[in-house]
Amino acid sequence: MSTGPAEVRAALAEAYRGEWGAVFGTIVRLTGDWELAEDCAQEAFARALPAWEREGVPQKPGAWLVTAARHRAIDVLRRGTTERGKLAEAAALKADREPQPPGDERLRLVFTCCHPALPLESRVALTLRAVSGLTTREIARAFLVGEDTVSQRILRAKRKIAAAGIPYRVPPPGARAERLDGVLAVIYLMFTEGYAPSDGNTQRDSLAAEAVRLARLVATEAPDEPEARGLLALLLLQHSRRAARLDADGRLVTLDRQDRTRWDHALIAEGVALAREAVGAGGPYAFQAAIAAQHALAPTAAATDWAAIVTWYDRLLDLRANPVVELNRAVAEGMHKGPQAQLDAVDALGTSKKLAGNHAVPAVRADALRRLGRAREAAGVYRTAEAIAPNRAIAQEYAKQAAVLEQMDEGNVPL
C-alpha cells in the first residue's frame, strides 16, 4: 500500500535523525571503510524515498535502511577484483552474520569518532558527520568556518583512524571511564558552542539541540555511567532556558532578568530527575547539573537558594581546582553573603593566569562594584569586559550596563 509523499518524507526525515548513525556504523563494522560506509548510507536513504512511496513506510525503518546499506556494501566489495577486495567481502559477510543492536553500533561510532588520537576539531566534525548525519555545509555553518575546512578535518580524521589502526569498538571496561570523559567533553564543547558561541552574534539552537541529542544517546546506551546522565541533565537544564536568553533584538537577557514562564518546564523536570539520579556518584557534570537545577527550580531570581549553590561549588572544587569554577563560586558567594564578599573573592582570583583575558572576571567585579554603589568604577570595569567579550550579544549586555551606570551619580545605584 503506497503512502503519500508528505508522509514518506516526514518518516524519512525522522529516520535520518534517528538512524543515520546506526546505518553508518553498521557498514563501518562490516567493512572497516569509512568512505564506503558514507556512500552506502547515503544510497540507502536515497533508495528509501521511492521504495517507501511505492510500498509504504516499513514497520522498522531503521532495519530497512541498514539492510539496504549492507546489501550495497557487500555488492560493491563483491565487484572488487583485487585479492584485498575479496578478503574484505569475506570479512563483511562473516560480520554480517553477527548483527548488533543499533545502540551498540552508535556507541562504537561515538567512541571511535572521539578517540583521543584525533585532534579535537576533527573529533567534533567527524562526530557530527558520522553519528549525527549533519552535512559538511551544516557543520561549517554551525562553527562559522568554510566547508572545505570541515571536509579536510573529516578526511584527516578518517585517514588517521585507518593509518593508526584505531579500533572500531567500545573500549574495554578498564579504559571505558577515561575514554567516556573524552566523549562527554566533545559533546559539551558542541553544546557550549551552540549555547554561547565563541564567535558570532547569537546562540545557535540547532547545534545545542544536536549536542543534547548526542548526550541522550550516550546516556541511553551507557546506562551504567552516571556521568553520562549528569551531562544530559546539565544540558537539558541549560537548554530549557534557550527561549528566554535573547530579547527580540537578539540581545542577551541575563538569568536574573529572564521570563521564567518561557523556560521549557518539561526539560527542567527531566533534567532535575536525571541530576538527582547522577549526583550520588559525585562526578563534575552531575554537580554542575545540581547547580543548574537550583536555578531551574527557583520560581524567581530572588528565591534562588544561593547557600545550596555555594555548597555545590565547594563539592565541585573538591574534585579539581578550577579558576572558572572559583569565579562562578564568587558570584554565588556574593549573592549569598553580599557584594563585598563577591568583590573580595574575585580580587583574590585576579592573579590566575588561566583567567587572563576572560571577560567574566571584569564582569563579575563590575557587578560587585555596582551593588556596592561604586557606579563610576563599575562602569569602567564593564567597559573593560565589553572590549574582550567573546561575541556581540555579550558585549552589548556589558555596554548597556556601563551606559546605565555612566548616567548615574555615584552612590545612587540600586543595590
Image (cartoon, rainbow, N blue to C red):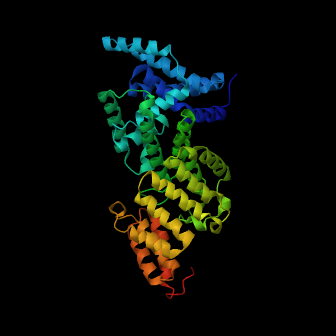
Residue in the foreground of this view, choosing between 324 and 270: 324
Residue at 38% over, 26% down: 167
> From this viewpoint, is residue 247 visible?
no
Give x and y (percent) for residue 206: 53, 48
Q: Residue furthest left?
A: 163
Residue at 47% over, 78% down: 369
Residue 412 falls in image quadrant = bottom right
**Image quarter (top left, top right, bottom left or bottom right) of the C terminus:** bottom right
User: Is residue 119 toward the left or the right of residue 374 in the image?
Assistant: left
> From this viewpoint, is residue 402 visible?
yes
Q: Residue furthest right?
A: 1
Residue 31 falls in image quadrant = top left
In the image, residue 321 above or below residue 283: below
In the image, residue 364 above or below residue 36: below
In the image, residue 212 above or below residue 324: above
**Image quarter (top left, top right, bottom left or bottom right) of the N terminus:** top right
Give x and y (percent) for residue 340: 49, 76
**Tally of numbered tags:** 0
User: Is residue 73 toward the left or the right of residue 219 in the image?
Assistant: left
Give x and y (percent) for residue 223: 57, 35
Residue at 44% over, 73% down: 344
Give x and y (percent) for residue 405: 49, 81
